[in-house]
Image: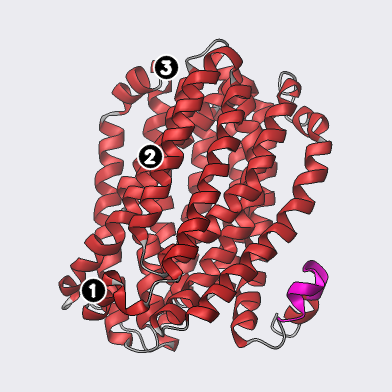
Amino acid sequence: MGMTAGSLARAILPSFIHSRILTSPIAKRLVSGSLWSLTGSATSRILVLIAMVLAARTLGPASFGEFGLIQSTLGVAGLMAGLGLGGTATRFVAQYANSDPRQAGRIIALVTLVSWSAALAVSGLLVAASAYIARIALAAPELQSAVAVGALLLLVMTIRGIQSGILAGLERFNIIARLNVLEGAVSLVGVVALARLIGVEGALLGLALGSAVAWVVGRRFLAEALRERDIEVSRAGCSQHLRILSGYSLPSLMANLVATPVLWFAMAFLARSEHGYAELGIYNAAYQWHGPIVFIPMILMSVSIPILVQEWEAGRLHRFRKVISGMCGATLAITLPVVIPIAVASPWVMALYGHGFERGWIVLILLLAAAPLHALAKIASGALLGMNRAWSVFGANLAWGASLCAISLWLVPAHGALGLGIAFVTAYALLALTTLALVVSRSRATRGSSVSTEECDQT
């Protein structure tokens, strides 16, 4: 992979970007990690997208809408299970892996212990409350068994997220790529086969199977990566890092506690509108194309966080800003050429999902238009996290959530999925502007004035 990184970069990036890649050590690290992550994540996303198309054709619009709403519900519960610890692992393992392996090992032990405890507790509560959630929150009592089955998916996805967060902190993106491909392949087979056998519950079990297989295989790879860095995972003394949870994990969790429940609320509100779950099925189908476009900047963000942390901690603000601007340029250069042709072909794309989905082509265009904006917001949020400004991310997400909810309440009753699409693109335009403005203003401040950085140094 290392021998082909430069040639592949020239093939996928415009000249004003790749001309700097081969001369900058930071850019080389970004490109190497990004290409591994891009290869793995792209393959995985394509496999999952195929699985979703086939599942939609099997389940139909209404049942596919139910499947999408349960996934969103699990996302809300998964926040409490994950506690924002995947990003915490990435951030602080990156900070200490080279300078203090013993410290990194204690942080990994703390994050793993807390995440397992929270995931088991939340999964158990989800099973116990499945009847209430189906009847009250989803207004569909028949979905109780699907919600209970979803608890297994929540558990394995949570622990997979922690595993990937640790590997990202170690900059082992090649391992993450292989595990993503494995997860996508198993999910494709599992979702399609089990959806045909037992419907919505089967589709959820198929996703859980993919995550579980990847996590089991990933345990061996992670152990090897830790040995190579002389990092010993030990619980002894890990409690001294509890301040990290309150200073970094808590605001990260709160930021996600805005984003994921807001999306769930919007979907649940749409489900209660006229033609409810059929409209939600159309939205869910269109959203399948928004995610694969945004995943590229998500890769750039995850790859860049270890580098941004190190540049910020060293006070090299000019290089810090240069990395961010380069990622924003690369993001637009990659996403826009993908968005435009899919938007042009939107009627045919939606027809792939089967009868009843064709009329959602305008919804697809709106969600595609939101993708570059969402992408820039992801890059900016990653930069803020690298600066240990998690509370700023929370504030930006709060403004985004308020705008999405307000516009949805206004437009969804009359326009259904189309109204939610308009709310979606408008809210992400606001989020992109807010987060980019915060990065510019915060990065101009002197590093010494950052209380959060001083607190991290004390830990």
Specify whether 227 is left or right of 288.
left
* Between discs 3 and 2, the one toward the N terminus: 2
Q: Quadrant of residue 2?
A: bottom right
Q: Quadrant of the N terminus?
A: bottom right
Query: Which residue is the site of mark 1?
Result: 455
Residue 147 lies in the magenta stretch: no
Q: Secondary structure at mark 2?
A: helix
Residue 140 circle label: 3
Q: Amino acid at mark 1?
A: Glu
Q: Quadrant of residue 50?
A: top right
Q: Secondary structure at mark 3?
A: loop
Residue 17 lies in the magenta stretch: yes
**Residue 19, can we see it?**
yes
Q: Secondary structure at mark 1?
A: helix
Q: Write down the region rendered in magenta.
A: 10-20
Q: Nearer the viewer, mark 3 or mark 1?
A: 1
Q: Nearer the viewer, residue 89 or 66?
A: 89
Q: Using a 10 Å C-alpha cutoff, classify the residue at mark 3 as few (fewer than 14 neighbours), some (14 to 19) or many (20 or more).
A: some
Q: Residue at x 45, y 70 (%)?
A: 443
Specify whether 61 is left or right of 271.
right
Q: Nearer the viewer, residue 54 or 68?
A: 68
| Position in image of residue 147 (x %, y %) | 39, 31
Q: Residue at x 30, y 34 (%)?
A: 127
| Position in image of residue 208 (x %, y %) | 48, 46
Q: Using a 10 Å C-alpha cutoff, classify the residue at mark 1 as few (fewer than 14 neighbours), some (14 to 19) or many (20 or more).
A: few
Q: Nearer the viewer, residue 52 or 32?
A: 32
Q: CA distance from mark 3 to mark 2?
A: 18 Å
Q: Residue at x 40, y 27 (%)?
A: 145
- Decide: marks 3, 1 in contact (CB < 8 A)? no
| Position in image of residue 42 (x %, y %) | 67, 57
Query: Which residue is the site of mark 2?
Result: 76
List the single residue furthest toward the top: 274
